[in-house]
Image: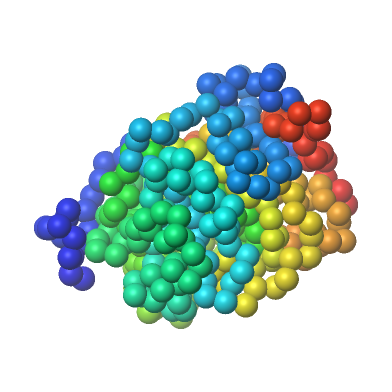
Amino acid sequence: MKNHSPRFPATAVVSLAAAFISTPILNAMDADPATSATSPEKPAAVYFTHDITPEGLQKAYRALGRPLEGRRVAVKISTGEAGNNHYLKPALIGPLVKSLGADIVECNTAYGGSRQETPKHRKTIEDHGFNEIAKVVIMDEFAELEIPCPPGSRHIQKDLIGAAFTNYDGFVVLNHFKGHMMGGFGGALKNLSIGVASTAGKARIHSAGKTDDAAKVWGELPPQKDFIESMAEAAGAVVQNMGDRAVYISVMNNLSIDCDCDSNPHPPEMADVGILASLDPVALDKACVDLVYASDPKKSASLRERMETRLGPHILDHAEALGYGSKAYSLVSLDEGRDPPSTARVD
């Protein structure tokens, strides 16, 4: 593999040293944003607004109390496969991205389609309107690098990510929560793992460490549990590297059983929920999962089945066991005079 990046002239792979519960519902004024991360004494704050608008997105960001202004900021999203119309739209995310002076960042895929090769990916990015709101950087366009996974990782010891990751010292991990054909659901942890991984890194995760070759990975996939755990391990590598330079926001709209990487996704069956934000990506994903289970059981049935048949919630268990987040959280309302929805499971 050749490296064309002036930042990494020596090699294309660079080693980089790293670094279902009863949930209380709070009002935003009762929470201290400066201590929103999980601690043994206090569950993570997960902020919630019903307002799925640019203003609601900015409100969720501000509630976290971790300003990134003045940094070199990357907003990691999925730019969406050609043919997909469920991805987070530029009109929704544009004001936040512009207010931070941020770049949008992505990586190429590993399954063919419209985003595995950079020229096609850039055409898809343009068609979806992201160039109109920010510079878009494909992080593995020129090089990739390895960062260590958390201690206790079972399947992959190093995560292979897009090298342009190192160009930034502030990160907004902006997720569209929805189902996923292979992972059960896609949220913060998927965006941190598959989303930040290079094409070869995606092959490494999907194969549970057996190959970095995207042409070979689909021939013999590992046990599903191993793949889910590999995603958790890769996400942990990115989380521990970013440290306190990152915030995590998830938008629960267009809740299809299929991911934004699907060019022909199933129509959403359940209603939009809202925007959630946290300094703990594990707590954030857990809150989103809980809200699916707390929604109308008939309308959410397909999404719940998709998550369960793919062992999706297991990623939360493995991530928590690796120590970079917790499933314990408190849901905090950002809507004056209005509580967030209950997270009590509806069967």
Residue at 23 percent across and 50 percent down: it is 15
Residue at 46 percent across and 30 percent down: it is 67
From the viewer's perspective, is residue 264 above or below residue 241? below
From the viewer's perspective, is residue 249 above or below residue 216? above
Q: Nearer the viewer, residue 28 or 19?
A: 28
Q: Is residue 315 visible?
A: no
Q: Give percent across and percent down for residue 257.
A: 69, 66
Residue at 51 percent across and 67 percent down: it is 128
Q: Give percent across and percent down for residue 154.
A: 44, 51
Residue 121 located left or right of residue 227: left
From the viewer's perspective, is residue 43 above or below residue 210? above
Q: Give percent across and percent down for residue 238.
A: 40, 46
Residue placed furthest toward the left = 10
Q: Nearer the viewer, residue 153 or 182?
A: 182
Q: Is residue 255 visible?
A: yes
From the viewer's perspective, is residue 266 above or below residue 94? below
Q: Nearer the viewer, residue 125 or 347?
A: 125
- Report which quarter residue 72 is drawn in: top left
- Report which quarter residue 275 is drawn in: top right
Q: Quadrant of the N terminus?
A: bottom left
Q: Give percent across and percent down for residue 84.
A: 59, 72
